[in-house]
Image: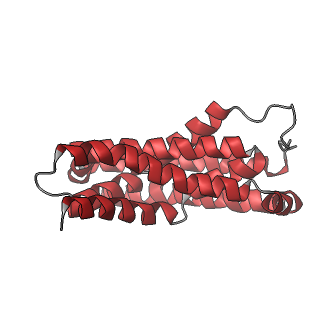
Amino acid sequence: MSVTAIFFAILGALLIGAVSPGPCFVLVSRIAITASRRNGLAAALGIGLGGALFGCLAVAGLTALLLKLQWLYIALKFIGGVYLLILGIRIFRGATAPLSIDTGGPVAAAPLLRSFSTAFVTQISNPKAAVVYASVFAALMPKSPPLWLLLALPPMLLFVEASWYAIVAIAFSAASPRAIYLNSRKWIDRIAGTAMGGLGLRLLVEGFRAQKS
């Protein structure tokens, strides 16, 4: 396989991983609906930057090291699990709180930096994402990769992840999804919060099991 083919194979494999529903999808769609399209795009950028960071770590071989250091991997499972659990509880508890939807008027939406940072932390707090990056790089990266490949992958990973979640943000910030959300907000938020918290609990359970084994 040529280096160019390897380049696109890595991007394709990680795009498939990004498209698979997970905590980032839940978060971006909810931010886009409850805040604004700009906030959703800011969240998409935060996730893309997290993907670029994983790409840099994978290029440096640090995520592969994560697979060898069992204690570090378990610690990240606990940290990520606690973060996602807290985030899920916040979403669930806020299901009945008053909500101000941005309609493009002069009233400011939620701070863009908050949407960006929340999405970024959600991305990097998931150790499974790091493992996916490490696995893809380990399987596809040539033994002696050219410099251009090492330099091109992180920004392209940012582009791939941010582009996908930008599509999610644009789709869920449209009028129809917002109307559906407002009509069923209490149950949608409770389902989203339960899903996010469930992912956190799953990481914690996996951490306890890995610790005992």
Camera-side residue of 88 and 101: 101
- Count of numbered tags: 0
Instruction: Determine whether 16 is above or below 119 in the image.
Output: below
Looking at the rendering, in which quadrant would you find the N terminus? bottom left
Q: Quadrant of the rendered structure where residue 9 is?
A: bottom left
Camera-side residue of 128 and 103: 103
The answer to whether residue 213 shows anywhere in this view is no
Camera-side residue of 68 and 183: 183
Q: Quadrant of the rendered structure where residue 36 is?
A: top right
Instruction: Determine whether 72 is above or below 197 in the image.
Output: above
Q: Residue at x 66, y 46 (%)?
A: 40
Left or right of 163 in this view: 50:
left
Question: Where is residue 148 drawn, in percent x and y?
Answer: 23, 45
Question: Where is residue 177 drawn, in percent x and y?
Answer: 78, 61
Instruction: Determine whether 30 is above or below 56 in the image.
Output: below
Q: Residue at x 88, y 43 (%)?
A: 98
Q: Quadrant of the rendered structure where residue 206 is?
A: bottom left
Looking at the rendering, in which quadrant would you find the C terminus? bottom left
Q: Residue at x 38, y 64 (%)?
A: 12
Residue furthest to the left in view is 144
Q: Residue at x 23, y 51 (%)?
A: 64
